[in-house]
Image (cartoon, grey):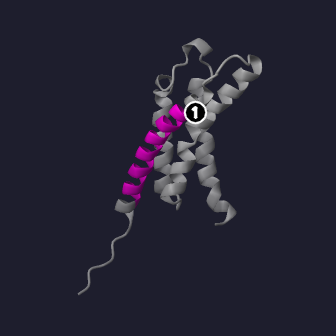
Amino acid sequence: MTQNRFFWPAAAAVSGVLAVGLFLWPLAYSEVELPTSLMNASMLVLLLVAAALMVWTPTPFWLAFLCTAAAAPIAVMLRVTVEVAADPTTHNLWPLEVVLAGFTGGFFAFLGVSIGWLIRRARRPRPAPAG
């Protein structure tokens, strides 16, 4: 793979982290309840980013899924890291938080990548009939 081939999957991962983070990071510690706190417009953005990555780039299914599914756990882990640095007694169940975010983000990423794969397949030119 060339360096240019990794640009769009990396851009999708970063945009997914920012989309999830912009909704999750401003919440107070007492307001966060996973996975409910992730069920907002950020998951729609994650789904759309995954679909767009499949439709408009030659990214393989597995790479598009992994790059977009990782966005939610990364955003949660960034929040956990900042809050634990400020108060080490918080987030004693942080591995569970990351797993819940992974399943939530993975579900929406899989939907988006699957939709994008179907659209990519429908747009593929068909061979001319013989005869």
Quarter of the rendering containing residue 94: top right
On the image, the x and y values in percent for residue 44 come to 45, 35
Examine the structure image and report whether residue 119 is included in the region drawn in magenta: yes
Q: Residue at x 64, y 55 (%)?
A: 7
Q: Is residue 41 visible?
A: yes
The residue positioned farthest toward the bottom in the image shown: 131
Horizontally, is 78 left or right of 102 in the view? right
Q: Residue at x 58, y 24 (%)?
A: 24
| Residue linked to disc 1 | 98
On the image, the x and y values in percent for residue 37 come to 50, 23
- Kindly report the secondary structure that dominates the magenta region of the rendered protein: helix
Q: Quadrant of the C terminus?
A: bottom left
112 relative to 6, above or below:
above
The residue positioned farthest toward the top in the image shown: 30
Horizontally, is 3 left or right of 116 in the view? right
Front-lying residue, 93 or 53 = 93
Magenta stretch: give its range.
99-120
Front-lying residue, 127 or 19 = 19
Q: Residue at x 39, y 50 (%)?
A: 115
On the image, the x and y values in percent for residue 52 come to 48, 49
Quarter of the rendering containing residue 28: top right
Quarter of the rendering containing residue 68: top right
Front-lying residue, 30 or 14 = 30
Q: Quadrant of the N terminus?
A: bottom right
Examine the structure image and report whether residue 101 is included in the region drawn in magenta: yes
For label 1, the SS is: helix
26 relative to 2, above or below:
above
The residue positioned farthest toward the right in the image shown: 85
On the image, the x and y values in percent for residue 6 come to 64, 57
Q: Residue at x 38, y 55 (%)?
A: 119
13 relative to 44, above or below:
below
The amino acid type, in three-letter code, at marker 1 is Val
